[in-house]
Image (cartoon, rainbow, N blue to C red):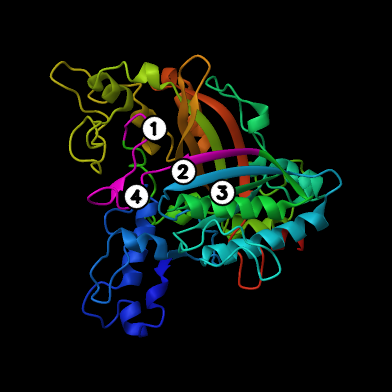
Amino acid sequence: MSRDKSKKNEPRGTADGVGGAGISRRRLIGSAGAAGATGLVLGAAGGYAATSGDEPTLLTAIGSTEAMFHGKHQPGITTPLQARGHLIAFDLAPGAGRREAAALMRRWSAVAQRLMAGKPAGDGTGHDTGVALDAGPSSLTVTFGFGRTFFERTGLVARRPAGLDPLPPFSSDHLDAKRSNGDLWVQIGADDALVAFHALRAIQKEGGATARVRWQMNGFNRTPGATARPMTARNLMGQIDGTGNPKPDESDFDQRIFVASADSSGGSKGSGASDGSASSASAYEWLAGGSYAVVRRIRMLLDDWEKLPVVRQERVIGRRKADGAPLSGGSETTEMDLEKAGRDGRLLIPDNAHARISSPEKNGGAAMLRRPFSYHDGISADGTPDAGLLFVCWQADPFRGFVPVQRKLDRGDALSPFIRHEASAVFAVPGGAAPGEYVGQRLLEG
């Protein structure tokens, strides 16, 4: 959840929206947090901060919004989409084990907490690069996860959950092993590019001799305040992307997205570790309140896509390009009528439309919270744009969330000829750190 630091000394009644005449700043920021889980981008209200008269301010408020480091869940999962993002995977250096990993996570957590509060990276003993001087927190989030191989390198295989078992292969995979997987994963997001880069440099420097960068991917979304009102984000194909995301006010949202304490194994194969070396659910309690991130680098074949007329693009997706409404009618948020046919007797939403195949109704209720970034890494040697989606989805179990949906898409999605999956990884993301605790402490010291 975000807050505006300029009102932290305000009387509690007004700050909490109790006893005040209007909607308070904290209430507005809370609304923004809920919107983030549906893929909404903050609009012209500039982060939903308010002035002393409780009137929403414009873009000047963007830098003042602050995401909380401590909490039940790590930040960067239900946080509203941010304008700039960096995804980085690290491998532990040869000889580094559990002790070194614990020291690294302690350092990373400390620097993340400082940066998310808008403070310099150093604690007075080190040198801050000065990249983010003059900027506020800008909704910076830093999120940490562990890959399958991390547990082997730290001697913790008995505590590795089944949710980290390898994903099955898919026909659209053209995976680059050098840009896939990794021992450790860090997701950085912010509403200012310099703030995000500042965090990236700090995390890389704190890795020191313990962790080496395996791969890094840089992404972006629309900047908050760029639209007249909050809107669901568009991807580089021009399509509104994220309409069908689970919403925090749904009764089963936490069950779908976060690993529960009673089921912290977080895998589809039961409560045992993926190699059967542990059977007690307490071995996975470190993951309670956490989630799984499936990360896929999906290249969009934009030259081919842009040759299609808009009406054909809409039939590939199953939604109108202009406003995201389903082809069965209504507005963006109208539920799809998958059985509705036109005058010619053909289904308005084609059998192979992306929106139909990926809908929970067609996947036994399988759902995941999509929170992607777009990317553009220049022009390839063949003259085509190296651009697409850094797909990040969150779920309590990737074998009940991502896998069944991707299997369905793999068998006949009309969008498949226009995309290529070039990298893949899965990370177990622990719950949030309590005050005085570092992320992953319950795993590394439990």
Disc 2 to disc 4, C-alpha distance = 18 Å
First in sequence: mark 3 or mark 1?
A: 3
Q: Amino acid at mark 2?
A: Met
Q: Amino acid at mark 3?
A: Gln
First in sequence: mark 3 or mark 4?
A: 4
Q: Is residue 126 above or below residue 355?
A: below
Q: Is residue 104 above or below residue 19?
A: above
Q: Residue at x 34, y 49 (%)?
A: 40
Q: Are marks 3 and 1 in contact (CB under 8 Å)?
A: no
Q: Are marks 3 and 4 in contact (CB under 8 Å)?
A: no
* Closer mark to the observer between disc 3 and disc 1: 3
Disc 1 to disc 4, C-alpha distance = 27 Å
Q: Indicate which disc residue 362 carries.
A: 1
Check disc 2 and report the residue beneath it: 368
Disc 2 to disc 3, C-alpha distance = 18 Å
Farthest residue to the left: give it.
343
Check disc 3 and report the residue beneath it: 187
First in sequence: mark 2 or mark 1?
A: 1
Q: Residue 430, how many percent across, how many down?
A: 62, 56
First in sequence: mark 2 or mark 4?
A: 4
Check disc 4 and report the residue beneath it: 41
Instruction: Tell me if residue 439 can be seen.
Output: no
Towards the viewer: 170 or 279: 170
* Closer mark to the observer between disc 2 and disc 1: 2
Numbered label tally = 4
Q: Amino acid at mark 4?
A: Val
Element under label 3?
strand
